[in-house]
Structures are given as C-alpha cells and as structure tokens.
Image (cartoon, grey):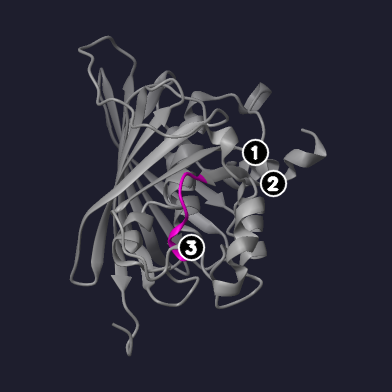
Amino acid sequence: MSSELTPLHDLLDLLDLERIERDIFRGDSRAAVVPRVFGGQVAAQALVAACRTVPEGRLPHSLHAYFLRPGDPGVPIVYTVDRIRDGRSFTTRRVVAVQHGQPIFHLSASFQAYEEGLEHQEPMPPAPDPETLPTAEEALPRYAHLFLDPELPERIHRARAAVDLRYVDEPPFGRVGRPGEPRSQVWFRTNGKLDGDFDDPALHLCLATYVSDMTLLDSILLAHGRGGWVVGDVVGASLDHAMWFHRPFRADEWLLYDQESPTAQGGRGLGKGRIFTRDGRLAVSVIQEGVVRVPRGQS
C-alpha cells in the first residue's frame, strides 16, 4: 500500500487478529476520540473472530450484539468463539470479548452459503452524489468553535482517517438548537482500495460493521437540536447493535447510510439504518439502541 493509505492499513492491521488458540483470538485495542475503545472496533473484531471459525464459503447474514462495559484502550481484547452450530445451510457462532477478566461485549452471528431466493427491496432514498459533498477534513474545522475541546476536530479526523465519511446535511453539532426531522444520511467508503489479500468478501462486511457504529444515533440528536458529547449537551453510549447483510457490496466503493430514529425515551434512543450501494441495492439493515442522557442542570 502507498503511504497515503497508512490509516487504512492501520485499520486493517487492527482487524487482523492474532490466533492464540483454536477458537481464541487477541486484538489490539486503541483509544477512540473519547478515552475508551470505539464500539465499532470491538464489533468488527468480534465478527472477524467468528468469520475465522466458519466453513469456507459461508458469510455472515446477521449479527446481534450487546455492549456490556467500556473497553480499555490500554490493553488487548481477547475474543473467545463458541461454535454453536454447523448445519447444512447455516452456521451459528457466539463471541465474547474480554478485558481484565470481565466480558465487555458479546456477539451472536449467523452465517449462510449463498443461495437463490425471492427478491424485493425498498427503493433507495434520494441523495446527492458523494463527490459534491465536503470531506470530513474540509467540514470539521467549521465547527471547531462549538466543541468543548478545540482539538476535537483533529482527533475526530485522525480516528476516522481510514474512512471517507461525508454528511449529506449538517451533522448534529452543526444544528444545535434547531430541532428537525429525526433523519440523517452519510456516504462512506474506505480511504483506499482493498485489493490483493485484502479483497475478501468477509472483510468488507467487517469494515461496514466498523463504520455502522459511527453515526447511527445522530438522528436522535437531530430531533432535539442536540449536538451530542462533542458539545456537552448529551451523554451517550451504544447499548446494543444488530445488522442484517442482504446483498454483496464493497466497502471501498461508495455506500449510502440512511438513518432515522423512531423513538427516544427513558434515557435511551433507537436508531435504524439502511446501507445502499451507489447503484441502489439495499445491502445492509442496522438497528441500534443507545444511552442518550441530558446532563444534570440542562433541559
């Protein structure tokens, strides 16, 4: 890989787990923008671990996961895979991620060999071409004066440098005090091509899993004119995460992540997402619930 792809290479290294036993893997742990491990990293690494124990030719079609404790970026994460079932058509795996002797995350994933079947899907919603939208590097400095920490834009950019992620409209921290529709859209792709040893269909699914946790709760904030943790008007964290992989896609080609929130209540909010290929195929469905709390003293 060329030097400009170093952030992507680092992400691929992060997902390349060390096998320390037949069904036990170890992954590096890195700090996200906040002082804990990014949830998308843990989910993607857990899916990598599961993928490495299934029969050849079977890819994940769904996963269901819970975030149990914040991840410590200072120590590795150990992933233990349980081989729940290997059937004629489907394979099931359960993965537990452990740090400091305690589970921090667990995931169940189901795999299937490709087969023909009935076909229908929702249409892709309208969205501008991604090339017409500003990159994160171009957009983030516009909001630096709103952030609690003036260094946050640079830290966010570094944390997401492996992914080219472009908001269709302003992000939540650009619309503070202006409640709107609980809906948001981003285009994304890896910041570089996946070729050679990296052109693995399972890896594309794991990379989409990584990105899927970045912006899914934005639509909750937009409904209330909140900017989120970066401006200090909401405290949030992912609670659970579910994905269904419908059709093949490439993570290094543009994907539209269409997101909405049907409800928020009781200190929690729900986000729903659909990921479409650029030519309109529904590739992935995502649902996540997260903690969404207003700090004391704010209303």
Which structural element holds mark 3? helix
Q: Are marks 2 and 1 in contact (CB under 8 Å)?
A: yes
Q: Residue at x 47, y 65 (%)?
A: 173
- Picture layout, residue 146 above or below residue 133: below
Residue 22 shows in this picture: no
Q: Which residue is mark 2?
A: 7
Q: Mark 1 is on which residue type?
A: Asn
Residue 3 relative to residue 137: left or right: right
Q: Which residue is mark 1?
A: 191
Q: Which residue is mark 3?
A: 174
Q: Quadrant of the C terminus?
A: bottom left
Which structural element holds mark 1? loop
Residue 47 shows in this picture: yes
Q: Is residue 64 magenta?
A: no
Q: Position of residue 250 (x, y in %)?
A: 51, 26
Q: Mark 3 is on which residue type?
A: Gly
Tell which circle, 1 or 3, labels the residue nearer the N-terminal end: 3
Between 103 and 135, the residue placed more toward the observer is: 135
- Picture layout, residue 107 above or below residue 61: below
Between 19 and 44, the residue placed more toward the observer is: 44
- Observer-side mark, 2 or 1, equals 1
Q: Is residue 173 magenta?
A: yes
